[in-house]
Image: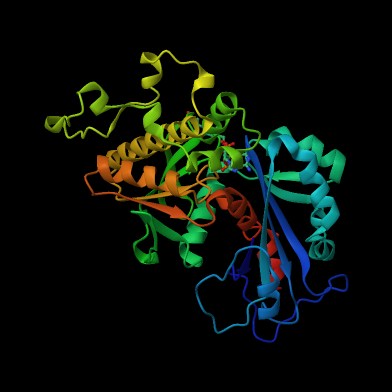
Amino acid sequence: MEVGMQGGRLVEPDSKIVSPTLSADEVSHLAVDIGGSLIKLVYSSINHNSGIDDKEKKSSKECSVVPNGSSNYPVICGRLHFAKFETSKINDCVEFILSKQLHRGGSWHHETFGNDKKAIKATGGGAYKFADLFKEKLGVSLDKVDEMDCLVAGSNFLLKEVHPEAFTYIDGREEYVQIDINDLYPYLLVNIGSGVSMIKVDGDGKFERVSGTSVGGGTFWGLGKLLTKCKSFDELLELSHKGNNRVIDMLVGDIYGGTDYTKIGLSSTNIASSFGKAISENKELEDYRPEDISRSLLRMISNNIGQISYLNALRFGLKRIFFGGFFIRGHAYTMDTISVAVNFWSKGEAKAMFLRHEGFLGALGAFRSYESHSFDANMTH
Ligand SMILES: Nc1ncnc2c1ncn2[C@@H]1O[C@H](COP(=O)(O)OP(=O)(O)OP(=O)(O)O)[C@@H](O)[C@H]1O
Ligand SMILES: CC(C)(CO)[C@@H](O)C(=O)NCCC(=O)O
């Protein structure tokens, strides 16, 4: 996945970055977000000669978006690259970094300016847990950046600079949302990773983590793995496409003899109890199709997160809720369930929106933190 980058690194029209060691399209900076389930990398390459040329864009196998915003200044042509690895396979990640020499990026100006050339920005719990491993295998230190700071910085960057980034998912249709950057705050950011963080965002660097839940993406993947014997997250997600949650979930109609419970606003098809049917049937786990289990699980977790998110939005009078994190994976059923939950509980008052770069908020935030240090100053030097 790639992103053309503006990122605020503007240079005066005639200024040049001179580096004897850089060739065109060389990696300049790397940031990592090491979470409970996944490691996310964001790195930039700089092309000194031209803008992002069309041929190159077309040849890219991965998604590419160009940030919004025009400038009268030539922008240092850069491209953001995204990659992810399972945290349990951290050695693959290390291999990838080594093979592309990503950890060497940025050393050109660091050498010039005498900074610590062997530190990369890192966020997530793994920035602590795996610091020794990075030092040992790559010879780099991890310059730790707070996870919540990074999530918010990444989200604000995407919402302000990258269009189209946020979209609603209603009745099976994605619709991109025009963001008015003068009317962006406050909003609720719900990051669904292994666990879930809910953050009230009031501005750049102005936020409060107002809630969270341990029932998140790790729960879906962990329980799903145990219950279906799936070998990968993608397989589990794929199964959910073909499943029917009504086989396992107890519906209002199952309890009310097929009728709605109109008085409290529940229709016969609403879920009364997730997985509730399993208690009344003389069935073993093997008697259920993995597809149905996956679907019920996905529904249960997405619905629960949607509901808690709405309650927190209500607590603070927030109308906009942006959902990020790799649990979402642009998956239709997940987004639909979350959207319906938010819409249902808020009676249409609050809106669920999703971010295209969902799982990369933290890594992007860490990447952006180079700017506040030497990166920006040196780049514009
Ligand atoms: N290929 C994959 N392998 C494993 N999990 C995946 C994959 N793709 C999506 N997921 C889902 O995404 C979740 C991880 O999301 P994300 O990377 O945003 O969080 P994290 O940083 O690992 O977690 P935390 O922030 O809680 O430490 C997993 O728990 C799983 O539900
Ligand atoms: C612990 C973190 C922040 C690590 O990313 C995340 O997994 C999370 O927000 N978990 C939910 C914890 C809770 O608030 O109950």
Q: Residue at x 21, y 35 (%)?
A: 267
Q: Position of residue 359 (x, y in %)?
A: 56, 49
Q: The C terminus appears in which quarter of the rendering?
A: bottom right
Kindly indicate the quadrant of the structure image that contains residue 25: bottom right
Q: Work out whether residue 128 or residue 235 is closer to the camera in this orientation and state it.
A: 235
Q: Position of residue 207 (x, y in %)?
A: 44, 46
Q: Nearer the viewer, residue 203 or 217?
A: 217
Could you tell me residue 109's position as x and y percent? 79, 65
Percent coordinates x, y for residue 154 in the rendering: 54, 54
Decide if residue 206 is on the left or right side of residue 115. Answer: left
Residue found at the very far left of the displayed protein: 263
Q: Quadrant of the N terminus?
A: bottom right
Q: Nearer the viewer, residue 276 or 3?
A: 276
Q: Is residue 186 visible?
A: yes
Q: Indicate how the structure is coloured in the image.
A: rainbow
Q: Please say if 155 is above or below 73.
A: above
